[in-house]
Image (spheres, helix red, strand yellow):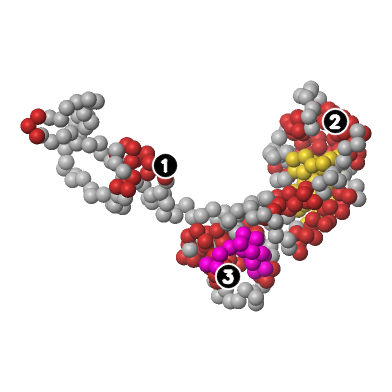
Amino acid sequence: MAHVESDPFSDTTDPSAYVPRIGTEAALVEMEMALREGARLVCLEAPPGAGKSILLNVLEERFTGDFRALRVPYPKLDPDEFCHWGLAALGGAPVDDPERALAERVTSGAAAGDPPLVWIIDDADCLPVPTLRSLLSVQRSTGAALRLLLARSGELPAEALDPVGVRPVSVALEGEMGCEEMAQYVGARLDRADADLVTREVIEAALDELYARSRGNPRRLHAAASVLLCFGRERLEALPGDPSGAPLGSIAQREPVQSVEIPAAPDPDAERVSIESLVAEAVAAEQPIEELAVAEHAPAEPEDAAPPDPSFDPLPPSGSEPPEGGGSSPAPRKRLRLRRLGRR
């Protein structure tokens, strides 16, 4: 497969970055078999960060030709909005009754010889119950021409399923890897990105720490590894650690314990300076950017200093001449000190 990005632990959903694991392959096979055997509603259930989104994309690639796929990127829509979106994606025009028009569009496509349509809905936890009922109603009226594939972090609400009499095929995906499986997964990500020797050594030397921070959850693992590569071991160790305070020990000997959440992004207190701030201040001060390495603390002004005259304009009018007799030029505009992100 082609390398998507040079970052081995980018949190991408591109299927070419997929690293097969026992749990993910089992879930893929179970979903594919359920759809091929005629299941009308399949629900992938996994905790946040387990890799549901990339798994749906891999599945979509695998059944290309046997099914058509329909995706709605934002599920938190009311029934009419959701059906209008689906109808437009299938080439239909806006109508007063989008639910009925959508069902007719799907049915006519199947009658014309189109493959069954699989409507893939990621983040289905955000799907309002009335919208879910509307989709189930469309599915019931279209029969085998439409299948629904939902990815959620929990079970579907019974109040949506009971009125239409539909029972989903539930496929569970474990949200955490064991320590040995995580080590294999990390190695596969490094191989996939063709990581250099230095990157490999940094990551492999920190496997215990990465497991302590992530407990094998892919999203937390990616975040911790990215912090390590971008900011170093010191910043990684500053992240929330093992709540028990016990020694980490060997990654091959430790059993998975309760998950520990880590920030999904680098610490906001990181020593960074906005490039836009540098450029804006350089233009305002009319000085080269290299001269903006300002000391952290500027000398304080005397407390008894007289307040500045509000009528005084420190900048000469455009086109004015320097004062005669070699007098000093008007004082330049006061240059504001840079404020580093995270400083108080």
Give left or right: position of 299 versus 216: left
* Mark 1 → mark 2, Cα distance in angstroms: 50 Å
195 in the magenta segment: yes
Residue farthest front in this picture: 2
Q: Residue 71 sits in which quadrant?
A: top right
Residue at coordinates 55% horizontally, 58% vertically from top-left? 226
> Mark 1 = which residue?
276
Q: CA distance from mark 2 to mark 3?
A: 53 Å
Q: Is residue 88 visible?
A: yes
Residue sitting at x 83%, y 56%: 30
Q: Is residue 198 left or right of residue 185?
A: left
Q: Which residues are magenta?
A: 182-198
What's under tag 3, amino acid-wise?
Answer: Glu
Residue farthest along the left direction in this orientation: 325
Label 1 CA crowd tier, 10 Å (few <14, some 14–19, many 20+): few
Q: Residues within 10 Å of mark 2 (few under 14, many from 20)?
A: some
For label 3, the residue is 204
Q: Are marks 3 and 1 in contact (CB under 8 Å)?
A: no
Q: Is residue 152 visible?
A: no
Q: Looking at the image, is mark 2 or mark 3 earlier in the sequence?
A: 2
